[in-house]
């Protein structure tokens, strides 16, 4: 049985095959009926716009029924374990996606092997977003080969997944964070201008992730020099075709300027669209296990 917990389960061949399928599904959205007559449960323990909408629409396009579940509406909200919930879900649905805080919760669920489990965002990882990001990079540059991606901002789940899955995809990924908000075990370049030199894409994310609200003020203060603006894009130099990426939701004036968010050098809204295509291809891979 396959699971997608971190994205690091994927071999380079798996990853490239998923991206090929995603591109094909983008051209012919109704060409796969892999979920015909089946349901997929989507458990959200944190808010979501893109992930929920793209999975609901994508599962419908695959012929399936998306079942969005909120803990407040379920016995989960009254203390039933995720583990028992999964055992029951496994009797009814083809797969379950979970957005939650601790990665350990998701790992525990997958360890039950009751049904395929996929990560819709945890504290440590956001693999579905990175699948969409890689598809977006492929579209923008024709191929992933030889590309350099600079992540600038908070050392969070997005940074972690971009580093891990970027390596599988063969990208050069550099990370620029303030020392106090660096990723564990990953070398960080403190100066964002140094980090973006020669980059094809500059990626950022919110400064205050869901669950980090307690340290919001300290993050905003430390991260101020890490905003993506036109000057930072210019600092990439090179061939002059650098693009800005952001998983969204954006906070214009914090991690990104309005000028970049709505400007001609971003592929941010394509990233948001590509969630659906990439996740449909991921579901095909998951169910082929
Ligand atoms: N990028 C992303 O996962 O957005 P949502 O939180 O809106 O799902
Ligand atoms: N790092 C952000 C990503 C949101 C899609 C968070 O976890 O809140």
Image (cartoon, grey):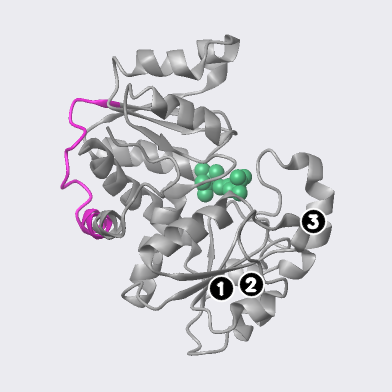
Packing grade of label 2 (10 A; few <14, some 14-19, many >=20) is some
Q: In which quarter of the image is residue 140?
A: bottom left
Residue at (32, 31) in percent of width and height: 116
Comparing marks 2 and 3, which lies closer to the viewer?
Answer: 3
Q: Between marks 2 and 1, how big is the CA–CA gap?
A: 5 Å
Cβ–Cβ under 8 Å for marks 2 and 1: yes
Is residue 283 depicted above or below 158 in this figure?
A: above
Name the residue that disc number 3 marks.
Answer: 220
- Which of the pair 36/238 is nearer the observer? 238
Comparing marks 1 and 3, which lies closer to the viewer?
Answer: 3
217 relative to 270 in the view: left or right: right
For marks 2 and 3, the one nearer the N-term is 3
Q: Residue 18: image x %, image y %?
A: 27, 54
Image quadrant holding the C terminus, namely top left
The kind of secondary structure element at disc 3 is helix
Query: Which residues, given as a range, are shown in magenta?
Result: 20-39
Name the residue that disc number 2 marks.
Answer: 259
């Amino acid at each position: 049985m396959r699971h997608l917990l971190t994205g690091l389960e994927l071999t380079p061949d798996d990853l490239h095959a998923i991206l090929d399928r995603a591109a094909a599904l983008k051209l012919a959205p109704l060409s796969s009926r892999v979920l015909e007559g089946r349901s997929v449960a989507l458990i959200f323990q944190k808010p979501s716009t893109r992930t929920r909408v793209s999975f609901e629409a994508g599962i419908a396009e695959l012929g399936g029924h998306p079942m969005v579940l909120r803990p407040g509406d379920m016995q989960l909200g009254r203390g039933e374990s995720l583990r028992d919930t999964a055992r029951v879900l496994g009797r009814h649905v083809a797969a379950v996606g979970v957005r939650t805080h601790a990665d350990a919760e998701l790992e525990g669920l997958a360890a039950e092997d009751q049904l395929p489990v996929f990560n819709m965002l945890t504290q440590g990882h956001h693999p579905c977003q990175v699948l969409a990001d890689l598809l977006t990079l492929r579209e923008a540059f024709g191929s992933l080969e030889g590309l350099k991606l600079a992540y600038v901002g908070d050392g969070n789940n997005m940074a972690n997944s971009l580093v891990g899955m970027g390596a599988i995809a063969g990208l050069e990924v550099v990370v620029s964070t303030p020392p106090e908000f660096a990723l564990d075990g990953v070398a960080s370049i403190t100066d964002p201008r140094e980090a973006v030199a020669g980059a094809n894409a500059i990626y950022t994310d919110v400064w205050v992730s869901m669950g980090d609200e307690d340290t919001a003020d300290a993050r905003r203060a430390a991260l101020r020099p890490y905003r993506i603006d036109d000057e930072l894009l210019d600092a990439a130099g090179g061939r002059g075709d650098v693009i800005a990426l952001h998983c969204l939701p954006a906070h214009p004036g914090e991690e990104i300027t309005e000028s970049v968010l709505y400007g001609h050098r971003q592929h941010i809204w394509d990233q948001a669209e590509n969630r659906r295509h990439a996740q449909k291809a991921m579901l095909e891979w998951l169910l082929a296990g």
